[in-house]
Image: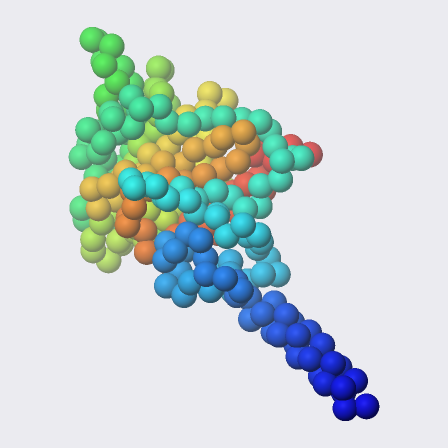
Amino acid sequence: MIKGTCIAASLATAFLMIFASAADARFLQTDPVGYTADQNLYTYVANDPLNHTDPSGMVTVCNQQTCTTTADSYNAAHSTGQTTVATPAMKQAATAGASTVAVHSGTQEKLGFGVKDANGNLTVQAATGVTTTTNATGSTAGSAVPAGAEFGIHGHIDTGPNKSNGMVDAPSLNAGFGDTRSLALHNPMPMATVSQGQVGWHEIQNGQLSFTAPVGALSPSQQQSIQNNLNSEQMLPSFWKP
């Protein structure tokens, strides 16, 4: 009788431990990406397991130079198969020409494009006829795409009352696309974001949206905001095959 009670109690305790872990939305082991996603190593998908999943804990993967976040709402069965990524030449040109679109203070973002000059070198040129919009969630800039453009690049606002949230985009200002809009063009292009002198990239590979930024460029809350945006952007018809 006593032995049976002990077994029953142990089973009940085990069940409660599993249930509590799910309710608290936490990993049972430390997050394999370390502190990149959150200062709490046991936090699971920003404590929102009803709306997000991350079974591997590797939504954000880092190497020595960069961290890449992918949309965890991606579903291979609905993949468009699209791949639009920045080449090494694009990345080099964007880094070299970041000052062209950098916005240290002010109210408007700047926009540019990577195009080849007369000598065939890929360079950043400021866009013309730029329209901008700003609200409580951020800013956006748009213009016609020049012939021969290979990538887009824009600057977020670094300081002042209209300061951007780092590299975080604002889907509410761009029909839900945020900074992935260039990836949905008829001739899609990767989009570079310049913030605090650093460059990040929105890309898509085999239909899965991603954002890559230098290590340390994003705070945990900014990283989570970008993750949330990618998750919603991935569900747009342009990136989701029925």
Quadrant where the image shows the C terminus: top right
Looking at the image, is 166 positioned above or below residue 204? below
Q: Nearer the viewer, residue 219 or 99?
A: 219
Q: Is residue 109 left or right of residue 136?
A: left
Which residue corresponds to the image point at 37% horizontal and 48% vertical from the top-left? 168
Where residue 229 appears, x then y in whole percent?
Answer: 47, 48
Farthest residue, direction right = 1
Where residue 22 appears, x then y in whole percent?
Answer: 61, 67
Which residue corresponds to the image point at 71% horizontal and 77% vertical from the top-left? 11
Quadrant where the image shows the N terminus: bottom right
Looking at the image, is 57 positioned above or below residue 78? below
Which residue corresponds to the image point at 54% horizontal and 46% vertical from the top-left? 72
Q: Is residue 12 visible?
A: no
Farthest residue, direction top = 119
Where residue 92 appears, x then y in whole percent?
Answer: 25, 26
Q: Is residue 76 visible?
A: yes
Which residue corresponds to the image point at 46% horizontal and 20% vertical from the top-left? 187
Looking at the image, is 154 positioned above or below residue 173? above
Quarter of image, res 121? top left
Farthest residue, direction bottom = 2
